Amino acid sequence: MKRKLIVAGCAGLFLLSASLVAAAKPAALKSLTICTEASPDGFDVVQYNALVTTNASADLIFNGLVAFDEATSKVVPALAEKWDVSADGLSYTFYLRQNVHFHTRGIFKPSRAFNADDVAFTFDRMLNPANPWHKVAGPSGFPHAQSLQLPERVQAIQKLGPNTIRFTLKKPDATFLSVLTMGFASIYSAEYADQLLKANRFSDFNLEPVGTGPFKLRNYQRDALIRYDRNPQYWGARPQIDQLIYAITPDPAVRAQRLNAGECQVSLSPRPQDVSAARADQVLKIVEAPGFMTAFVALNTQHKPLDNKKVRQAINLAFDRSNYLNTLFNGTALPASNPYPPGTWSYAQNLQPWPHNIARAKQLLAEAGYPKGFETVIWTRPTGSTLNPNPQTGAELLQADLEKIGIKAQVRIVEWGELIREAKQGAHDLLFMGWAGDNGDPDNFLTPQFSCAAVRSGTNFARFCQPELDNLIAQAKVTTDQARRTQLYLAAQKIIYDEALWIPIGHPKVTALTRGNIVGYRVSPFGRQNFTAVSVN
């Protein structure tokens, strides 16, 4: 009997110990894996203009002074809790959120909270060529800051106190607040910059980013994966997941396979056929929204014979848009005639997509002095995206259309990073490209794509600088009267259309596929990513 009591006592002790161990064991980390379509250029988002880079850096690691609320279409507080605008529209005073902390990373541990010094550094770096951090962008400068003409627009940035900063503009600017919602306006740590400067470690700003955002970069393997950890000190709504993984998967067919196998829970930029297959799948969900974006082919007006308007018009007439949209988008994109989508205020309803008219195209080529056509090169990326689901097929369709009017086009497939670098220098002839706006304002398309400043910064892929068009875009910024801005933008769209600077292709839906256990994921009309409210059941 005594022995039985001892055994029973030991069993009870074992059960009690096991329960204590179970209670002490930390809960399993909640992880979310996203199958993305390409590697980012880096994490110093101000240096780059590709959406894939914004999604990997600005939307996760950083915050701006303000943000754009897609539900209300309004600019809302972020690192700035509130702001004042002077009666003359020239001064914007921002009152900063307190007790916000930058990430600790590697050699850097912040000694203070975020303050006005960080805002001043962030913008001085972009606007002041004498700033030692300005040189990292190279001779073209910072693409968004340059194309949006911020150096010409901002008169001064003045720190009024530890948590108050004022921007003084040279003239009123109706787009200034909305510009600050863009990824390139992410706020950087001045203290981290000073530490890297003293150590001569400039590249760490791009490779070892430090921000105030909801996630911290853990590691990055180019063309493979990016790992992020939840920021435990985040000032905003706590992310529902502990770890975020970007599984870089350029082939859309492989993204679909990995989603089906459960290797990722969200797949970005799916092919139309994968969306159709998901409709019949009980395990997958389709998440979509109309995109504030445009797929297009830019015609480099600095290259002969594309400098001739009649040649550009002939190319537009040769392009079979309906065939292209049916083949590549399978009904998931609206045909485009203008730089930004229908439904945007100031959209020119009277401008219809160029018709498919081979006879008229040949006539225009002959009038331009090219009755037998000419040779050119079509540039495109190797892997698919929301704005270009099948790059090689799309380029070959255009190639076949141009052949019908005597234009012999070679298709050149260029890796994404090199494509952007070369295109910003104007190396291309015809360039398959896409543009996604950040905030619903027409200027978000017109200034970066058609202003003279954007030729210098490289984002104007048509390389077209015309004083009349440039003046219309500039005038529209200095008035807050939306009716007046609309008239100016209608006139600008007419010039862009008549000059045939693009082959406008389409305005696609933004679509993602998710596993059925994903809750809270929404796609953005701007193509940007927000995972703070996403949970895995």
Image (cartoon, grey):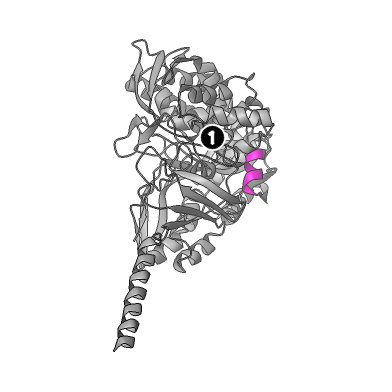
Q: Where does the magenta region start and end?
A: 415-421
Q: Quadrant of residue 8?
A: bottom left
Q: Is residue 225 visible?
A: yes
Q: Main secondary structure of the magenta part?
A: helix
Residue 355: percent from left, percent from top: 47, 44
Q: Residue at x 40, y 62 (%)?
A: 25
On screen, residue 18 versus residue 493, left or right, reads left
Let me know if residue 449 is in the magenta part. no
Residue 527: percent from left, percent from top: 44, 44
The correct choice, above or below, for 120 with respect to 536 in the image is: above
Label 1: how many residues lie within 10 Å, few (<14), some (14-19) or many (20+)? many
Q: Residue at x 56, y 51 (%)?
A: 38
The correct choice, above or below, for 379 with respect to 476 in the image is: below
Three-letter code, disc 1: Ala
Farthest front residue?
A: 2
Q: Is residue 330 visible?
A: no
The correct choice, above or below, for 230 with respect to 167 in the image is: below
Q: Which residue is mark 1?
A: 500
Judging depth in this view, the residue of 167 and 335 nearest the camera is: 167
The quarter in which the N terminus is drawn is bottom left
Q: Residue at x 42, y 31 (%)?
A: 181
Disc 1, SS: loop
Farthest top residue?
A: 88
The quarter in which the C terminus is drawn is bottom left
Judging depth in this view, the residue of 335 and 67 nearest the camera is: 67
Residue 480: percent from left, percent from top: 35, 19
